[in-house]
Amino acid sequence: KRDDIKAIIEEYGLTPEDLGTHSLRKSAGTYGASAPFITLLTLCIRACWKITSTLKRYIFHEKGGDLMLGRVLALLPMT
């Protein structure tokens, strides 16, 4: 709704209606998947993306992977 933000969006040939939460979730997922130490499973669980029922029964949330994914998405150093 802010004119200054609308101007920036329009510079890229977009309208405010072109953006939504899916844009943020998709880009975060793509960026997180590019990190060599983040497993696809960690990414799917954190993003609440569907995993087959069999995998859901036997594979559970991994705290360490979730923490690393959080650091990646927050652009924090890994060391």
Image (tube, grey):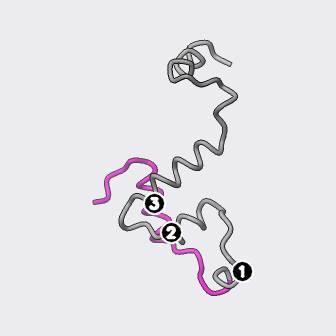
Mark before the other along the chain sequence, 3 or 2: 3
Q: Mark 3 and 2 residues: CB-CB less than 8 Å, in contact?
A: yes
| Front-lying residue, 48 or 10 | 10
Please give the residue where the numbered disc 3 appears in the rendered image.
33
Residue 67 lies in magenta, yes or no?
yes
Q: Is residue 20 left or right of residue 69?
A: right
* Residue found at x 65% / y 63%: 49
Q: Residues within 10 Å of mark 1 (few under 14, many from 20)?
A: few
User: For numbered disc 1, what is the local secondary structure?
Assistant: helix
- Position of 36 with respect to 4 (left or right) is left
Task: Say if mark 2 contacts mark 1, CB within 8 Å.
Answer: no
> 69 or 67, which is in the foreground?
69
- Label 2 element class: helix
User: Residue 61's quadrant in the figure?
Assistant: bottom right
Extent of the magenta region: 57-79
Q: CA distance from mark 1 to mark 3?
A: 22 Å
37 left or right of 17?
A: left
Of the image marks 1 and 3, the number of the one nearer the N terminus = 3
The disc, 2 or 1, on the residue closer to the chain's N-terminal end is 2
Q: Find residue 27 and report its horizontal and vertical position in percent.
A: 52, 47
Residue 19: horizontal and vertical position, in percent? 64, 34
Question: How many discs appear?
Answer: 3
Q: Residue 53, labelled with which disc?
A: 1
Mark 2 Cα-neighbour bin, 10 Å: few <14, some 14–19, many ≥20? some
Q: Residue at x 63, y 82 (%)?
A: 55
Residue beneath disc 2: 40
